[in-house]
Amino acid sequence: MATVTTRTNEAELARWREMSVRTLSPQGLVVFALEGVLRRVGLAEAALGSVALEDAHVALTESQDALVAVAGSLNPGWPPTANLRRLLDYCVRRLRDSNWQKDPAPLAEVTAVLSELADAFRQMGQGAAVPGPETEAAPRRTVDFAG
């Protein structure tokens, strides 16, 4: 009986998480993604400290993939997009450096940059309007701050 209850609770939690992500504003999605990267970077730092190199590798490659996805989701028509993509690309390179060298030092720099960026997106999202429904046949989820 406990197994059935646990599966039900896990299924309900998964549905809740999915709905939470689907209802986020574009800024909220970026914050959600950056917070996920920051968690993974923390895991990588701990793994490097305990010489769990495979765990560090997984966390760092997932972090890199997530940042590439965030950069790719930014609206190219929004003026800050080019600079944000360069900043995210720099963070990806520093994560790669950390992974290749098995050195936690670059992670502090990435954490500082991404924390500040997440705070900025959080502040932008406080006054942002809720986005309207997609009108394209195959909607692509982008972050559009141009209004």
Image (spheres, rainbow, N blue to C red):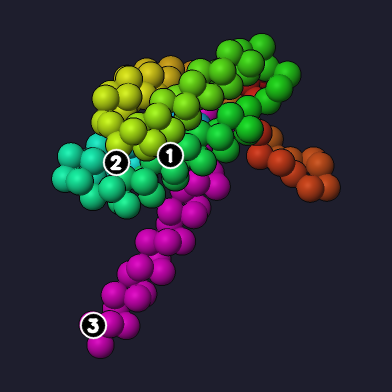
Q: CA distance from mark 3 to mark 1?
A: 35 Å
| Residue 20 counted in the magenta span | yes
On screen, residue 137 above or below 87:
below
- Residue at the image position 67 percent from the left and 17 percent from the top: 78
Residue at the spot of label 3: 2
- Residue at the image position 29 percent from the left and 75 percent from the top: 6
Which one is in front, 31 or 42? 42
Residue 112: quarter of image:
top left
Alpha-carbon neighbours of circle 2 within 10 Å: few (<14), some, or many (≥20)?
Answer: many
> What amino acid is labelled 1 in the image?
Ser
Q: Classify residue 99 as left or right of residue 75.
A: left
- Residue at the image position 37 percent from the left and 37 percent from the top: 99
> What amino acid is labelled 3 in the image?
Ala
Residue 28 lies, in percent from the top left, at 48, 33
Residue 77 lies, in percent from the top left, at 73, 19
Question: Which-is-in-front pick, marks 3 and 1?
Answer: 1
On screen, residue 17 above or below 132:
below
Alpha-carbon neighbours of circle 3 within 10 Å: few (<14), some, or many (≥20)?
Answer: few
Residue at the spot of label 1: 63
The kind of secondary structure element at disc 1 is helix
Q: Classify residue 93 as left or right of residue 101.
A: right
Q: Tell me the magenta residue range.
A: 1-29
Residue at the spot of label 2: 44
The kind of secondary structure element at disc 3 is helix
